[in-house]
Amino acid sequence: MAHVVVLGAGLGGTIMAYEMKDALRPQDTLTVVNRGSTYSFVPSNPWVAVGWREKGDIEVDLAPVFERRGIAFRPDGAVRVHPETNTIAMGRGDTLTYDYLVIATGPELAFDEVEGLGPEGNTHSVCHVDHALRAKTAFDALASKGGPVIVGAAQGASCFGPAYEFAFILETALRRRKVRDRVPMTFVTPEPYIGHLGLDGVGDTKSLLESALREKHIKWITNARMTKVEPGTMHVEEVSADGTVAARHELPFAFSMMLPAFRGVEAVHGIEGLTNPRGFILADKHQRNPAFPNVFSIGVCVAIPPMGKTPLPVGVPKTGFMIESMVTATARNVGALLRGEEPSAVASWNAVCLADFGDSGIAFVAQPQIPPRNVNWSSSGKWVHAAKIGFEKYFLRKIRQGKSETIYEKLALDLLGISKLKEIHEEPA
């Protein structure tokens, strides 16, 4: 009998638990460790921030779902992982022992790396539903009084899609309230060009996003490094290709939403052999840690090198489909080890993204996510907004039902013509 632990119950960890349960032998046990018992669908947070969703619309109580699936649940969270002894120091003060560990913690939000950044400072965030709720209060005040807006991401960020999404969703919400004419908007990003996305672009994302920003009268500053955010003023350095400062800006704002850089969570940060200097988990092509071969990792917490040199640090995003392919490969590989076999499944690391703009959007497919690619495609239209709503409903239903995959996902992928993008590769014996 073996005990498998999944650390984290977010977008990746929850479906990891479902797929891992299906891959276990009858005598094996599975425990999920998380801080709190609530799953929240993070991609819907921009809608929460403008009042298009309530908190309860996008949350699921995991405890009864895990109980139905026969999965043990520890909502007290982990204090520290000790991979050298196969133990986890728990929030209640006890110790949890594992045979195999899958780390799916997601990131820690590094607001402190820029003075004045974040909900405890002078900007808002959509990284957590509670942050989005605070942003909604500020959005209501903005709609009442007007004033300049800054949206974007900090240097070192690796998740640019939600920044673009929120800029356009906010613009749409302001137009619907008939106050857009009183709100000048600027998009501020460390990307070397609009639409880079940490992926050196996908298809024609540069032209598509630049065109969309121009159409919506949103100005932009690229190669932008925030140095400090004071109440109502953001200090930004615009750098040249060689990293030298080309211009300095003092940007006034009445409302700002800026995504932070990510780093590994405290429970794993700084463990030699397990993490890189930012605290992200080191993993081979089988999602397995080289130093601790009974430890696997999936999702945003996985260490992926940046995509080439850029004037400012720009990380690589881990999109939903990429995470799901990591999940399936990891479940298969842990299942193989339980049966005395060697891991052979390799995640596809394909990227399929639906970026909602409130009444339209941009979709892109990168196969694989890191170039050179076999598929490098992007498109825009109102269908993207409808597809994002449909995917939200589908995914929350999957979480509530405790299913790793349903026929609805397969049908949806077939309709989009991208069903093969989620394939998990098996190495030849």
Image (spheres, rainbow, N blue to C red):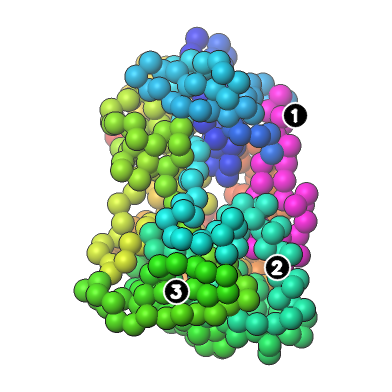
Secondary structure at numbered mark 1: helix
Residue at 62% x, 73% y: name it.
255
Mark 3 is on which residue type? His
**Span of residues in magenta:** 39-67
Q: Count neighbours of disc 2 (C-alpha within 10 A) and say few if under 14, some if 14 to 19, many if 20 or more.
A: some
User: Residue 246, located in which quarter of the rendered image?
Assistant: bottom left
Q: What is the spatial separation of the Cα atoms under label 1 and label 3, in whole angstroms?
A: 47 Å
The numbered mark at residue 122 is none
Q: What is the spatial separation of the Cα atoms under label 2 and label 1, in whole angstroms?
A: 35 Å
Residue at 32% x, 25% y: name it.
292
Residue at 66% x, 46% y: name it.
40
Secondary structure at numbered mark 3: strand
Which is the main secondary structure of the residues drawn in magenta? helix
The mark nearer the N terminus, 2 or 3, is 2
Judging by the rendered image, the residue that carries numbered circle 1 is 64
The extreme left residue here reads: 242
Q: Nearer the viewer, mark 2 or mark 1?
A: 2
Q: What is the spatial separation of the Cα atoms under label 2 and label 3, in whole angstroms?
A: 21 Å
Judging by the rendered image, the residue that carries numbered circle 3 is 235
Residue 72 falls left or right of residue 101: right
Q: Are marks 2 and 1 in contact (CB under 8 Å)?
A: no
Judging by the rendered image, the residue that carries numbered circle 2 is 138
Residue 77 within the segment the image draws in magenta: no
Q: 336 above or below 126?
A: above
Counting from the top left corner in percent of width and height, residue 370 is at 33, 58
Mark 1 is on which residue type? Pro
Q: 384 above or below 11?
A: below
Is any atom of residue 314 visible in this view? yes
Counting from the top left corner in percent of width and height, residue 317 is at 43, 56
